[in-house]
Image: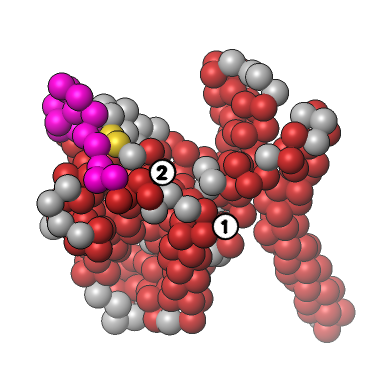
Amino acid sequence: MAEQKSNAAVSRDEALKRQSNISLIRSLLPVIGLVVVFIIFNILTKGGMLQNLSMVMTQIYVTMIAATGVFFIMTMGGLDFSQGSILGMASIVVCMVSKVAPVPVAVLAGIATGAGIGAINGFFYVNRKIKSFIVTICTMFLFRGIIKYLTSDAPVGANAMMILLNKDQLKLICTLVVVVVGFVAFHFTKFGIHLRAIGAGEKAAKFAGIHTDRTKFLIYLLAGAITGFAAFINVIKVGSVTASGGNQLETQILIALVLGGMPISGGAKARFMNVIVGSLLYIVLTSGLIMMGLTTQAMQLIQGVVFLVFVAIFADRESLKVIK
């Protein structure tokens, strides 16, 4: 009997060790993928990736900032497909306000616009108990229609002062501030603990004393506000907003987070590094494909295959049985 218990203990220890090794490999895979993809495209473009590294990096700011808010949403098990429309609407507001008020006021107006749309998402998700992906798809189409209406006659331009702010140093500082604050809040405060707890199991989180409904509403509001701030970076980069402003941003964010190792179901396995590594990997992958001269269709095909592979690796099939 004692020998059987000993064998069972050894088997259990081996299983735990094997599971730990698998988790370690899965966590390192996105970083390894980033390095490998960068090297491959640098070879295929004959050093073009390295030579144009600064140009490649200019494309990452909006994606990484907006991905930070969506990361919080996905950690608690939700989804948000309205990010592109939020960016487009907030960019229009930033442009309009910049013509009649100082730049800081325009930035605050963009943040408020994003927060307002995020609050709408949060209200219907929390108070009306509608699935997050349904709510955000509805608001995506709603505000995309408004964007097209507001830009139907001509693009909405910003004040010339906004365009003068288009400096890499400013965009880098703004991105770093968002990322650093998000990292600290997620890993070193109750904020991150509550998000992971809700993602792992909402009922258990309620029993632990977490105000789940209030937290979920505030997260959608926060994610909208963060994307509203990203709209400022978008405006100083392009100078105006057209009907396609922010189009496909939600897809870019979702692909970036999954490439970074973000589990679709959220929970305890979420790490803030998913945002950083995923955004870098997505931009390097996209820029490399463009430098190789591939068509849009070919790029979408390759991105789709890579996305499916990473989903298969990082998806928690048990948690995915319930869509929040």
Q: Secondary structure at mark 1?
A: helix
At x 83% / y 74%, what residue is drawn? Answer: 10
> On residue 261, which mark appears?
none
Q: Report x, y in % for residue 114.
A: 23, 53
Q: Which mark is residue 276?
A: 1
Relative height, residue 293 to residue 16 (above, below): above
Three-letter amino acid code of the residue under disc 2: Lys
The residue beneath circle 2 is 237
Please tell me whether residue 284 belongs to the stretch shown in magenta: no
**Magenta region:** 144-160
- Inspect the image, locate mark 1, and give the three-letter code of the amino acid beneath it: Ile
Which quarter of the image is occupied by the N terminus? bottom right
Q: How is the image coloured?
A: secondary structure
> Which residue occupies the foreground of this view, 210 or 42?
42
* Closer to viewer: mark 1 or mark 2: 2
Q: Is residue 285 left or right of residue 169?
A: right
User: Residue 322: percent from the left, percent from the top?
Assistant: 38, 49
Where is residue 210 shown, x and y percent of the image? Answer: 30, 77
Mark 2 Cα shell of 10 Å, populated few (<14), some (14-19), many (≥20):
many
N-terminal-most mark, 1 or 2: 2
